[in-house]
Image: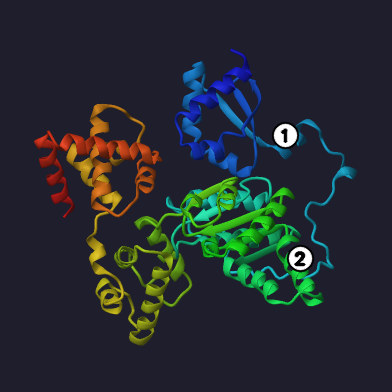
Amino acid sequence: MKTDELFDKFLLEIAGQVSQQSYSIWFSKLKLIDIKDNLITIKVPMNTHKQMLGSTFQDLINNTFFSLTGINYDFKYLTEEEYLASTSPILEEEIEPVREIPENKIEWKTNLQKKYTFDNYVVGNTNRLAYVAAKAVAETPGVIHNPLFIYGRSGLGKTHLMQAIGNYITEHSNLKVLYTTSNEFMTDFTGIASLDKGSSSLNYASEFKNKYRNVDVLIIDDIQFLVGAEKTQTEFFHTFNELHQANKQIIISSDKSPDDLKKIEERLRSRFMWGLPVDIYPPDLELRCEIIKAKIKNTSIDNKLNDDVIEYIANGCVNDVRHIEGTINRLLAYTAMMVPEKITLDFAVEALKDYVNTNIFVNNSIASIQQAVADYFQIKVEDLKSKSRSNKVVRPRHIAMYLCRMETDENLVKIGFEFGGRDHSTVSTAIDKIEKDLKTDENLDKMLKEIKNKLK
């Protein structure tokens, strides 16, 4: 088999084993450089791909090539720059400074807050894809994922991530970055319409276009608030087109996916899908605990909380990061008054009463359901998330997916994500199967009740 044919077959096999979104981001732009001895050299778009392919997808890549060839290969990943450097050494006099910022650079108002960075953004399973995509955009603005459309409900860290992109770009280049909100865009545009025709109106219109179109990176928050503003949507449509055609980076956030923004013009929604729409889910328990640890770092209560208190707060703040921040501020204020040596669980309960929902502490979660089902069938949680299709695993997996849908508020996408990154249609099929079997299988009904009792 020729090397190009082998690599094409490899990509085809990979496409059948990962989600369409994962394939599009991590595999679709890979180029085979060489297969020599036991080493396969592959060209990748950026350093982020090298990290992901060499860690998260390493076993998948190894196993796929082995199944095709029977050979255990080593792999080497090169970016375009590294590949060119290895084939055509650059003479010293040809080297030019990259992204040098002129000393006389004119100050540009970015509207960014310096506190939002990638370094202080806490990453977990529910926001990792958005984080990786954001880093990729920050490293190569206008080249990949344009536009980047980040969506999720309020308080999940969309603004932090968007501004982290902007701050990274301004620190590593002389590109003009503008962060704004859809409300500010609407207000600025409405100002043009409010002026009478004349020189002042023309000047304002010129200033408006200079602000929003004479940029290299436009970051616009809460695009959903353009609903109902038809003229503003038209203006944003033209702004979007001009920037996109010039390969300028556009980053947009919303509380809904592009498909769900039904009252936004179709031509705009279709453009939002041109790049990469990526969602951020509410943080799971593990991520909430990590966020709490990050938020209390270098505060007066740092090193005063044990894991029980952190988990108590995490279980009481399941909605969003802002709720976590408010809870920590409440605990800080109470601690400042009482000055305890240590913050015990009893102290935290007293400090936060009427502020956190203690009932949530015992609510079911996907993780607890997975554990209960795994214990019942005497298998491992990892088996439920694996690619195994044995009857010993498939039936429990279907039951676990069904219970997650019935006993939690999680959507099909989130459930699929927690079961090894499966597609929402797979989860839907599993639920339908269990519902159908319940009509004729009394033992299944009894089994579900026993697992529910374990959860309680």
Is residue 56 or residue 17 the one in the foreground?
17
Q: Where is residue 362 in the image (x, y as percent from the top left)?
A: 22, 60
- Determine whether 87 is above or below 223 in the image: above
Give neighbour class at mark 2: few <14, some 14-19, many 20+ (Cα, 10 Å): few
Q: Position of residue 104 (x, y in %)?
A: 84, 68
Q: Which amino acid does label 2 sit on?
A: Asn
Q: Which mark is residue 205?
A: none
Q: Residue furthest bottom?
A: 337
The answer to whether the residues at label 1 and label 2 have Cβ atoms under 8 Å apart is no
Which residue matches tag 1?
83
Q: Label 1 vs label 2: CA separation? A: 38 Å
- Determine whether 128 is above or below 325 in the image: above
Q: Which residue lies furthest to the front in this view?
A: 197
Q: Quadrant of residue 336?
A: bottom left
Q: Which quadrant of the figure contains the N terminus? A: top right
Q: Is residue 413 left or right of residue 14?
A: left
Instruction: Kindly tell me whether residue 113 is visible in this rendering.
Output: no
| Foreground disc of the pair 1, 2 | 2
Which residue matches tag 2?
210
Q: What residue type is labelled 1?
A: Tyr
Is residue 15 or residue 39 the one in the foreground?
15
Q: Residue furthest top?
A: 1
Q: Position of residue 229 (x, y in %)?
A: 57, 65
